[in-house]
Image (cartoon, coloured by chain):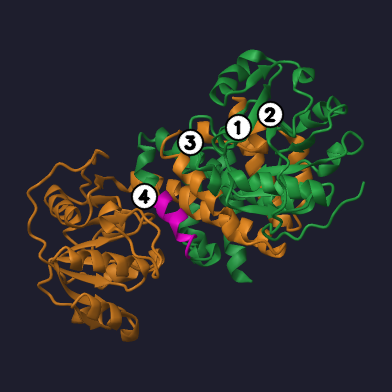
Chain colours: A green, B orange
Amino acid sequence: MTQIKLSGKRCILENGNMIKSVAIIGSGNVATHLAIAIFKAGVNIKNIYSPTLDNCTTLAKRVNAEAVDDIYKIERNIDLIIISIKDNAIKNVVEHLKDFNSIIVHTSGGVNIDVFDGYSQKYGVLYPLQTFSREREIVFNKVPLFVEANNLSTLIEIESFAKKISDTVIQADSERRKIMHIAAVFACNFVNHCYDISSQILRENGIEFSTLIPLIEETTKKITEINPHDAQTGPARRGDTDVINNHLKSISSSKYKEIYKVLSNSIADSYKE
Amino acid sequence: MTQIKLSGKRCILENGNMIKSVAIIGSGNVATHLAIAIFKAGVNIKNIYSPTLDNCTTLAKRVNAEAVDDIYKIERNIDLIIISIKDNAIKNVVEHLKDFNSIIVHTSGGVNIDVFDGYSQKYGVLYPLQTFSREREIVFNKVPLFVEANNLSTLIEIESFAKKISDTVIQADSERRKIMHIAAVFACNFVNHCYDISSQILRENGIEFSTLIPLIEETTKKITEINPHDAQTGPARRGDTDVINNHLKSISSSKYKEIYKVLSNSIADSYKE
């Protein structure tokens, strides 16, 4: 495999114009939001595939595509096939796409581009850095898209396509994409779990979670202006061990007690250095 | 000490009108934002105290108050004294206020009301649930204020005063306030530390933290509409151990590796039950 070196800079390539038709494999959260964005950008979505037709029929109708439950029913002259399914299912699907001449991409933060090795000539990655829930509308052109490809001409095509649906298209090889994904796990998945824990603690005591919303909103707004390291407040930041020990006594769940300790120690440590 | 039972409900008492003058002990983040809110509400701030005049002179000027560096220079006929200093310094200050007839409150989430026992006749707590940084302006009337007092007439006065600066005034005894404080540590302090870690991971790899902002904003917006438990996404939520192990290999800091493990296990556990 020839791997091209990616700069990590915003894309400056402007010459791609080949991708005029798309098929999407998958109908989950990412596939749904991506399909809607592509449809809105005026690109023709020919097929949406799911092993169970029921799962993709509604989405297919919404984006004027044909729902299929057999990969071999995807049209052969399609320009781009987007695989947007669970990470550990990608390899298996790729093996079934050997006979397609389309550009093939997956949308995963965590799967290396080498998953396509030996199965395709033109392939890459189109990773949207966002948390998608079916119920929530997303302003897709604000979602950063990380692109990677196995050769320059394919990269140009994927980039050009990505720019139709997002204002922020960034080149990143698999290693850089993994770093972004890890950062996203901390800044999104772990943050949300902290919200979940606080919500549970309040519920156990009959207090509404909504009371925390102004605090949560300010915590987030703050770091758009101040470096998170400088924005840190709270007992661990102040080194207030009396409050920390008092809190630990009041937390009933041993799991949450451990999280409280580990995170407080980490905060305290990071201001000692 | 007679402790009155507090409902945890929003206040409905309307008859307090005694507090027309205030002194503030402290000039840190909370004291500063509180002083500005009180000044804007048209209540007369007579004194701002700090052991070092330099620390409180600017703030005192801004709210038309006199800066003092000796607690005994605080005017004797003041209606309300607000102690807004480090938790572990409150006790010592309270001991110096024995001769004052004013209502005395502290603003801490973590300090029990019994810190005033034996030192005052009219006392309570005024806890603003917010993260305050000096550089950031706060819309103070959106900050929930938790109030507590040692008797009903004092509670009426503190509540009435609190309502002048905030739209959300909630009665909470010390135990409830502690619960709120613990929930706030998870939803604000720990969340911010997760932002800090992701920022460090990106910086080590030459990637701008600002790339994460759309993801961070959506993560926060989501939980104003969806229960955080239902909003959870990511590898731990999906039980994707391949991605988790792959991430753990890439995290160089043993401290952040531990945090990644503890939080991922906690997420996974909370969807098993």
Q: Earlier in the sequence, mark 4 or mark 3?
A: 3
Q: Earlier in the sequence, mark 3 or mark 2?
A: 2
Q: Is residue A55 above or below residue A81?
A: above
Let me know if residue B91 is in the magenta part.
no
Position in image of residue B53 (x %, y %): 31, 85
Chain label for disc 2: A
**Circle 4 sits on which residue?**
A214
**Circle 3 sits on which residue?**
A137
Say which quarter of the image contains residue B239: top right
Q: Mark 4, residues whose alpha carbon is within 10 Å: few (<14), some, or many (≥20)?
A: some
Res A35 label? 1
**Circle 2 sits on which residue?**
A24
Camera-side residue: A254 or A237? A237
Chain label for disc 4: A
- As measured in the structure, the alpha-carbon distance from the residue carrying label 3 to the one carrying label 2 is 19 Å
Q: SS class of the residue under badge 2?
A: strand
Q: Is residue A114 visible?
A: yes
Q: Earlier in the sequence, mark 4 or mark 1?
A: 1
Q: Nearer the viewer, mark 4 or mark 1?
A: 1
Chain label for disc 3: A
Please tell me if label 3 and label 2 are on a single chain. yes
